[in-house]
Image: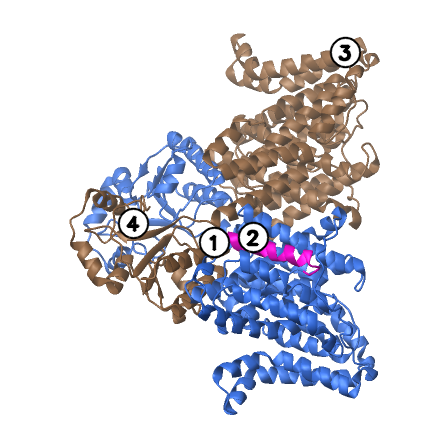
Chain colours: A brown, B blue
Amino acid sequence: MTWGRAYTRTTFEADIVAALIVTIMLIPQALAYALLAGLPAQIGLYGSILPLVVYALLGTSRTLAVGPVAIISLMTAAAVGQIAARGTPEYLGAAIALAFLSGLMFLAMGFLRLGFITAFLSHPVISGFISATGLLIAAGQVKHFLGTGAEGQTLLPMISGIVENLGAIKPVTVLISTLSIGFLFWSRKHLKGVLEALGMAARPAMILSRAAPLFAVAGTTALTWGFGLERFGLATVGTIPRGLPMPALPPFDLALWRELALPAALITIIGYVETISVAQTLAAKRRQRIDPDQELIAQGGINLASAFSGGLPISGGFARSVVNFDAGAATPAAGAFTAVGMALATLFLTPALYHLPKATLAATIFTAVISLIDVKAIGKTWRYSRADGFAMVVTILVTLFEGVVAGISAGVVLSILLQLWRASRPHAAVMGQVPGTEHFRNIRRHRVIETPEVLSIRIDESLWFPNARFLEDTIYDAVAAEPAIRHVVLNCPAINYIDASALEALEAVNARLKDAGVLLHLSEVKGPVMDRLMRSDLLAHLGGKVYLTQFDALMALAPEVTRETLAMPRCETARRAADSAAGNDFNPT
Amino acid sequence: MTWGRAYTRTTFEADIVAALIVTIMLIPQALAYALLAGLPAQIGLYGSILPLVVYALLGTSRTLAVGPVAIISLMTAAAVGQIAARGTPEYLGAAIALAFLSGLMFLAMGFLRLGFITAFLSHPVISGFISATGLLIAAGQVKHFLGTGAEGQTLLPMISGIVENLGAIKPVTVLISTLSIGFLFWSRKHLKGVLEALGMAARPAMILSRAAPLFAVAGTTALTWGFGLERFGLATVGTIPRGLPMPALPPFDLALWRELALPAALITIIGYVETISVAQTLAAKRRQRIDPDQELIAQGGINLASAFSGGLPISGGFARSVVNFDAGAATPAAGAFTAVGMALATLFLTPALYHLPKATLAATIFTAVISLIDVKAIGKTWRYSRADGFAMVVTILVTLFEGVVAGISAGVVLSILLQLWRASRPHAAVMGQVPGTEHFRNIRRHRVIETPEVLSIRIDESLWFPNARFLEDTIYDAVAAEPAIRHVVLNCPAINYIDASALEALEAVNARLKDAGVLLHLSEVKGPVMDRLMRSDLLAHLGGKVYLTQFDALMALAPEVTRETLAMPRCETARRAADSAAGNDFNPT
């Protein structure tokens, strides 16, 4: 709330203009995303009034625009559809309970500082999930374009539903859909340019082009009313109850809450990841700060506010926030002004929406979510990392064919398993001394001198449970292969920490090597790692010693060879190795 | 099978002696662990014949002794008890199916080289699980000691069962139990010493002391037979079918297999972790090699062999393998000779076991598993790492009060979550130049010189999805706090890899900083990390450059301050920092 003290007439004007533009954009979105969630249209309006005021009070982003968003609405439909049939009071009650539960989870995460939980979602998994969800939402609109009633939450039932109902296509509905989609795609690319060519200034042209969905709504509503298109089977929004939402309590039903707990948790995590990413993108552009923990509390507040005013689960919207930012919103007050605009629309505009075709709302959803589908990201991720690309593709396929809950769950589990798999086989190198230097390098990549009785081994990864066995296997194998070995020096410059499993593995290695007449030494142990080892028994039982450098270790354990190597002329390989070594391990292999 | 070529009379004699000792030890164990699994006593014998021959052919450890083991038997009882009632043919069939499934899983892991899966079990979780299982097994024997019939797979039902049946205690059973337990504990500590004091040589004294359980069995069987103790309610083993097991197929029932899949997977993982750890401990002492993938195949073979000969899930036994090793077993042939011993016992010894009290077998189990309970490990782990200690305590509590499947599952999930949590908040430092040197150190720990327009930041951890957000937060916060910053140099000597999530975070940081007029640079990037970055777009879009060293970066970005600092006399702090720096980051903070 620091911005309140510096509030001036200029910021007030900027906020009012931004609020006007966002309101124009939000009205059709609020209606459309409520329908996407399987709810009556006014529920979207209810979720766009009180929560915006609450965000202005609790949020730390100056430009985040909250309200109903496509992905959260789809997840709501998937979760609530498991529990009740669309159109029943139970369905609405479950959606409200979902917003309430999600709000409680946000608050709990905020107060317990559990924001790190969202870190378990890797970017490729989120990106794949959003692309797949976008495709699911887009495919789900096709039935509205055709005027047929097929249902289905995953791709196969959707497609078979469309194919089965091809005979029931309503031509007028297809016409209205085509007009709406065509206009929306055209206006996104060309409307601003055309308006400017007609002599309009850049700023009003931009504002008007953002209002394209509202034009589509107004135009098709007028057409429907003028020609009485309902008689051709065109589905319209119909009666929207007029007036502001009454404050109400969400249903208190523990069995219902238990059923909704997992979807609520996933909605919370996805909502937070999306919100924080938008908020941070915009804040960084103006060098402002976002407080992630406070942001969790704000997201909890808006979802509770939505639940208490009869609304659905909501979140920060990407497109809407960018528009708010571009329109010059200076403070969160812009959000509060948007709330006033939405309240006025709910009070006075709803009768005019009676003849609004559902196909037009489907078109606004379709054009919005198409941009979520990022096919290029798959190839890009795959090229950079097979493991990440694999996790992404699996997330997409499972989301499309098994649904959103299964998709995000599979992605999370798989990305964790793949990371553990990667960590279970770290890069390791047996090292030798570079002639003429104090440096040690991988014997398989450099011309270096080895000492038969001393094994120098470096592991390029922190030591923790996935690689504890690798550590043991590697050392035992090396020692078993070379009977001359009397000392093993574990070189630790790449080890940032050692967990209890790896500590036990080191203790086991130390004890077993001792039994076999071999001493274990450590070198170049980092400060924080050493601090922690001091709290263990390893150093007391260690057969060998801890050396400051690998060179120190070799000077103590094989002084003749080491000194002799130091006196050798540097060969070309050695010189290059030493040069890069001056860059503190620029190329450590 | 390389050992076969070098087989001599000496190794043959060593193997025969070891086989004799292990057979004497294995007979009561095989009977006892079958009863622990809720199965007829002979099933334990069946699991100790053919599998031992198979291990001699497939295994890579020269001294591992396989057969029924306590923990796997308890896990078998827990899994099969969910499906059928004890004593029914379905119960036996399910146990055989469990051995079969576990065998298939071992083979699949071996051929697909999935041994790394076991790396997901951290040592504290395994240690906690084993302690808790040992306690559960020990507590489960109390009913046999008292002669009452209480059932229960977790601690609370066990205790309440014991308390409820206190009135039904059978004094003769308590007497036999007390004698057996007392003798077994006494003989473990003192029998060898007493025999040596009586003039026996060390080696036969050792062999005889290992045979203490067999003496207990023989002694109490004789007592029961001589005094007809069954009439006082003493439960005995009764009729054991004589003869070798008939080869048979396990039940092919997909519904049953599906129910047993999770327990079979957990038995496989626990069995493997235990086996490989024993095998490796013993192999390392003689500098022999274990092949983990081949070991998986061998474990698969022994469990299939057990299933096909009507036996239960089995594994490598710790105590038995140590005895085999100490007794001088030179090759896996010792295991095959043990199989011959067990076959002879099954053929000829079973009638003699009719009067064997179950309380005596319970006593051999009790004295064996008591040593599994490692209370000291809890404090040791807690002191070294709170996170690991926490995972251990939760594993113990959940295993004791919710059962083995819940316990091991909770431990695995928790240890992964805790590692991700740790990884989500790595150590990071803003750095400044140490006067008179080219070194850079943490500004909060050293007297260093900062440059207002260049932010030098080092993150002491690989960059991957749990800390991708941390990376963004840290840099944005630092840049938002200091308006003078024009360059950010990310110093990367501790970064062993960058995953796709962290790459995206770096791209986002780069783009957002550029928007805010700040350039992102990298320094001291390791070779393998650089190789991978070359495959991404980051380097092409990077606002700044990649420098070989942090000093190079500062010389390019803030040459005056850097040169001036270099010319300063080293102060005491700086000298010490530089000294430790000579040790390639011995104390990098």
Q: Are marks 1 and 3 in contact (CB under 8 Å)?
A: no
Work out whether residue B315 or residue B126 is closer to the camera in this orientation and state it.
B315
Using the rendered image, report if marks 1 and 4 lie on a common chain: yes
Residue A210: percent from left, percent from top = 59, 20
| Gap in angstroms between the C-alphas marked 3 and 2 | 66 Å
Please give left or right for residue B435 compared with residue B279 in the image.
left
Using the rendered image, report if marks 4 and 3 lie on a common chain: yes
Pinpoint the chain carrying mark 1.
Answer: A
Circle 1 or circle 3, nearest the eye: 1
Pinpoint the chain carrying mark 2.
Answer: B
User: From this viewpoint, which residue is outermost toward the front?
Assistant: B9
Q: Amino acid at mark 3?
A: Val
Question: Circle 1 sits on which residue?
Answer: A467
Q: Are marks 2 and 1 in contact (CB under 8 Å)?
A: no
For mark 4, does the 10 Å Cα neighbourhood hold few (<14), some (14 to 19), or many (20 or more) residues?
Answer: many
| Gap in angstroms between the C-alphas marked 2 and 1 | 21 Å
Q: Secondary structure at mark 4?
A: strand
| Gap in angstroms between the C-alphas marked 1 and 3 | 64 Å
Q: Give the numbered dot on residue A172.
A: 3
Q: Is residue B297 magenta?
A: yes
Eyeballing the image, is B469 above or below B158? Answer: above
Work out whether residue A430 or residue A179 is closer to the camera in this orientation and state it.
A430
Work out whether residue A228 or residue B6 is closer to the camera in this orientation and state it.
B6
Q: Which residues are magenta?
A: B293-312
Confirm whether residue A374 shows in the render: yes
Using the rendered image, report if marks 1 and 3 lie on a common chain: yes
Pinpoint the chain carrying mark 4.
Answer: A
Q: Are marks 3 and 2 in contact (CB under 8 Å)?
A: no
| Gap in angstroms between the C-alphas marked 2 and 4 | 36 Å
Question: Circle 2 sits on which residue?
Answer: B297
Question: Circle 4 sits on which residue?
Answer: A441
